[in-house]
Image (cartoon, rainbow, N blue to C red):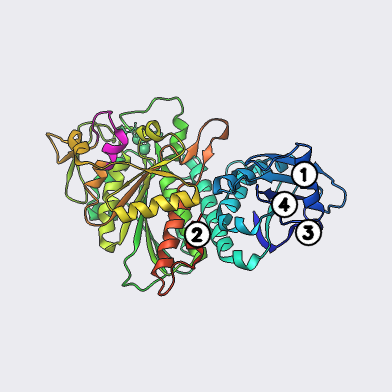
C-alpha cells in the first residue's frame, strides 16, 4: 500500500483530488471554516452526525467537493483509541465503495497519534495474498494523511510507515500455512532482510546446533521431516562496544503437540505458533528502514513439533545448552524447550536486555483473553518501558508475576527441571521455566498466545507485538542520543 503525508487544511481539502476524504472530527472542532466546516455543522444540527468516537457519516458526490465521497468520522476526545476507531470505521465504510485513493484529514493536535492512525488504515486494508492471489485487492491502495503542517509530522510519519512495513511482514509470514512457512522458509526470509544495509544474518542447521549443545531445541525438532533452523539476525546501528537488545521469537512453524497430541478441532491455527518469530522479522524490517543508532540481535529457533517414530516421548530427559537437564512430561510444552536454548545462546552478546516473544500457553488466553499480551520481566525499568510502549502504540500488555513459589511444580525426580507443572497458572509456570535460563541479563517475556492472531471469520495474524517492540527500541535509541530526550519524535508521541 502507498502511504503519503501532505500539508492540507480543511479549506484546501475541498479541492483535493482523491476518491474519498475522511475527516477526523473531534469534540473541540471549531477552528475550521469553509465548505467542509459548513457540512459538518449542518450534519450535527440535524442530528445525523455526532463527534463521539466511532460515529461515521458518508456523503456521496457532495456538491462543491472534488472527491466523490466524504466521510465524517468522530474521534470524541481524541484519545489514541478514538483515533484508531475512527480511521478504522472510515476505511471500512469506504471499502464498500469504489474508492482507490483516500485522504485522511487530521488536525494538528492529532499528529501525536500518527502511528496509531496510519497503522489503523493499513490494518483495515491489509489482505493476505501469499496463497490466495485471487484476493489481490482492487480496492484502496493509496492513503494520504493530510495535516495542517506536515513538516512537524515527518518524523512520526516515518516511524508510522516503518511500523506498518514491520507489522505487514509479520502478518504475512504468520498467516502463511506451515507448508509455505517451513523453518527453512523463515531462514530465507531472514536472509532477505540481510540485504538491507546494517542487517546481517547467519543460519545454523542441526550440525551447528548440536555442536553448541542445544539438546532441548534439537529434541523438539527430531521427529520432523523439515530440518530445524536457528536464525541469528543482527542490526548494527551503533559502535560494536554498545550492548545490544536481543529479541528471541518462538518459531514453531507447526505445533501438533507431538506425542502429547493436540485435539483435532482448530489445530490448523497452530500454524500461527511462529508468530513470535514473525514479530522479530517484522521488527527487523522496520529497524532497517528507520536506521536507529543502536544494536539489536534477533534469534529465532525454528522447527516443527511432530509426532512419529523418532519423536520425543513423555518422560524423556534432554540436556539443554545451559547444562540443565529437562524431563519432558508433556511434548506439547515445546515452546519453552526451544526458547531455553536461545536464551542461553543470547548470553554471548552480553546484552543490555533480552526480550522473548512467544505464543507460549493456552493458559495466557484464559488469563488475559485477546486484548493484552502477558508481560513478564525481571527488571523493573525494562518492564515499565515495555508497558509504556504498549500503551503508546495501543499494543497492550499486562504485567504478570514471577514469584519463586510458582516454580514449585516444575520439580522433577529425574532431571534438574520438568517442562510442565500442573494446570494452575499455566502461563506463569511456563515463564518460571524460562526464568531459569534468563538469570544473566535483564529479561522480559511476552506471552502472545491470545493476541498474535484472531480466530473465526476474521482468522488471521495481527502482527503484534511489533508496535510495542519498535516503540520500545526507538525510544531507547532516542534516549541514548547525547543531549536529546524530550524533544524527539517518539518521546513527543508518548505525551498524551
Ligand atoms: N503453542 C501452544 C500454546 C497455545 C495454545 C497458543 C493455544 C495459542 C493457543 C503451546 O506450545 C502449548 O501447546 N502449550 C501447552 C502447554 C501445556 C502442555 C502445559 C498449552 O497451553 O496447552
Ligand atoms: Mn505446544
Ligand atoms: Zn506451541
Q: Inspect this view and state whether residue 302 appears.
A: no
- Secondary element at tag 3: helix
Measure the C-alpha gap from mark 1 to mark 3.
25 Å
For the residues carrying marks 1 and 4, which lies nearer the camera in this image? 4
The residue at which mark 4 appears reads as 102
- The mark that comes first in sequence, 4 or 2, is 4
What kind of element bears circle 2?
Answer: helix
Q: CA distance from mark 2 to mark 3?
A: 35 Å
In the image, the segment drawn in magenta is: 420-431
Mark 3, other Cα within 10 Å: few <14 / some 14–19 / many ≥20: some
State the residue at coordinates (25%, 42%): 432
Residue 409 percent across, percent down from the top left: 19, 33
For numbered disc 1, what is the local secondary structure?
Answer: loop
Determine which of the numbered discs, if any, sits on residue 98 in the image.
Answer: 1
Q: Judge whether residue 347 is colored magenta.
A: no
Alpha-carbon span between mark 2 and mark 1 = 31 Å
Q: Which residue sits at x=69%, y=51%?
A: 29
Q: Is residue 215 left or right of residue 170?
A: left
**Is ligand 1 within 8 Å of the beta carbon of the residue shown at mark 2?**
no
Q: Which residue is mark 3?
A: 11
- In the rendered image, residue 427 lying in the magenta stretch gets the answer yes
Crowdedness of circle 2 by 10 Å Cα count: few (<14), some, many (20+)? Answer: many
Disc sitting over residue 257 in the figure? none
Which residue is more in the foreground, 239 or 301? 239
Instruction: Name the residue: 41% across, 49% down.
Output: 277
| Percent x, y of residue 431 | 28, 42
The quadrant holding residue 312 is top left
Left or right, residue 303 beside residue 38: left
Can you identify the residue that label 2 sits on? Answer: 286
Residue 273 in the image, given as x and y percentages of width and height: 41, 40
Amino acid at each position: 500500500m502507498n502511504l503519503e503525508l501532505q500539508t492540507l487544511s480543511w479549506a484546501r481539502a475541498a479541492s483535493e483530488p482523491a476518491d474519498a476524504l475522511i475527516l477526523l472530527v473531534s469534540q473541540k472542532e471549531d477552528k475550521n471554516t469553509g465548505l467542509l466546516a459548513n457540512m459538518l455543522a449542518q450534519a450535527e444540527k440535524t442530528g445525523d452526525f455526532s463527534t463521539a468516537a466511532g460515529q461515521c457519516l458518508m456523503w456521496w458526490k457532495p456538491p462543491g467537493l472534488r472527491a466523490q465521497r466524504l466521510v465524517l468520522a468522530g474521534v470524541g476526545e481524541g484519545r489514541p483509541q478514538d483515533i484508531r476507531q475512527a480511521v478504522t470505521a472510515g476505511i471500512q465504510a469506504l471499502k464498500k465503495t469504489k474508492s482507490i485513493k483516500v485522504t485522511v484529514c487530521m488536525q494538528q493536535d492529532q499528529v501525536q497519534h500518527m502511528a496509531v492512525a496510519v497503522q489503523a488504515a493499513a490494518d483495515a486494508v491489509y489482505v493476505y495474498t501469499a496463497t490466495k492471489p485471487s484476493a489481490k485487492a482492487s480496492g484502496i491502495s493509496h492513503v494520504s494523511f493530510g495535516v495542517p503542517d506536515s513538516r512537524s509530522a515527518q518524523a512520526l510519519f516515518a516511524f508510522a510507515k516503518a511500523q506498518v512495513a514491520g507489522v505487514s511482514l509479520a502478518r504475512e509470514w504468520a498467516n502463511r500455512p506451515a507448508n509455505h512457512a517451513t523453518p527453512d522458509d523463515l531462514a530465507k526470509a531472514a536472509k532477505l532482510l540481510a540485504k538491507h544495509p546494517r542487517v546481517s544474518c547467519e543460519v545454523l542447521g542441526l550440525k551447528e546446533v548440536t555442536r553448541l549443545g542445544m539438546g532441548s531445541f534439537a529434541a523438539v525438532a527430531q521427529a520432523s521431516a523439515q530440518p530445524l533452523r536457528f536464525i541469528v539476525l543482527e542490526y548494527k546501528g551503533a559502535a560494536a562496544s554498545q550492548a545490544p537488545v536481543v529479541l528471541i521469537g518462538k518459531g514453531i512453524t507447526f505445533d501438533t503437540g507431538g506425542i502429547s497430541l493436540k485435539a483435532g478441532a482448530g489445530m490448523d491455527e497452530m500454524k500461527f505458533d511462529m508468530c513470535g518469530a514473525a514479530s522479530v522479522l517484522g521488527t527487523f524490517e522496520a529497524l532497517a528502514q528507520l536506521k536507529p543508532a543502536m544494536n539489536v540481535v534477533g534469534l529465532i529457533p525454528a522447527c516443527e513439533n511432530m509426532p512419529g517414530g523418532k519423536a520425543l516421548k513423555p518422560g524423556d530427559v534432554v540436556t539443554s545448552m545451559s547444562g540443565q537437564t529437562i524431563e519432558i512430561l508433556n511434548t506439547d510444552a515445546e515452546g519453552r524447550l526451544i526458547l531455553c536454548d536461545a536464551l542461553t545462546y543470547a548470553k554471548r552478546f552480553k546484552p543490555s536486555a533480552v526480550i522473548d516473544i512467544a505464543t507460549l500457553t493456552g493458559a495466557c488466553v484464559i488469563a488475559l483473553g485477546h486484548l493484552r499480551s502477558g508481560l513478564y520481566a525481571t527488571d523493573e525499568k525494562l518492564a515499565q518501558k515495555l508497558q509504556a510502549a504498549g500503551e503508546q502504540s495501543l499494543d497492550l500488555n499486562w504485567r504478570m508475576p514471577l514469584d519463586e513459589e510458582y516454580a514449585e511444580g516444575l520439580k522433577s525426580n529425574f532431571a534438574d527441571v520438568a517442562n510442565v507443572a500442573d494446570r494452575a497458572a499455566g502461563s506463569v509456570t511456563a515463564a518460571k521455566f524460562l526464568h531459569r535460563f534468563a538469570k544473566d541479563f535483564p529479561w522480559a517475556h511476552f506471552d502472545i498466545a491470545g493476541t498474535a492472531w484472531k480466530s473465526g471469520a476474521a482468522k488471521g495474524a495481527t502482527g503484534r507485538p511489533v508496535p510495542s517492540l519498535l516503540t520500545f527500541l526507538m525510544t531507547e535509541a532516542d534516549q541514548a542520543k547525547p543531549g536529546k530526550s524530550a524533544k524527539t519524535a517518539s518521546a513527543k508521541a508518548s505525551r498524551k
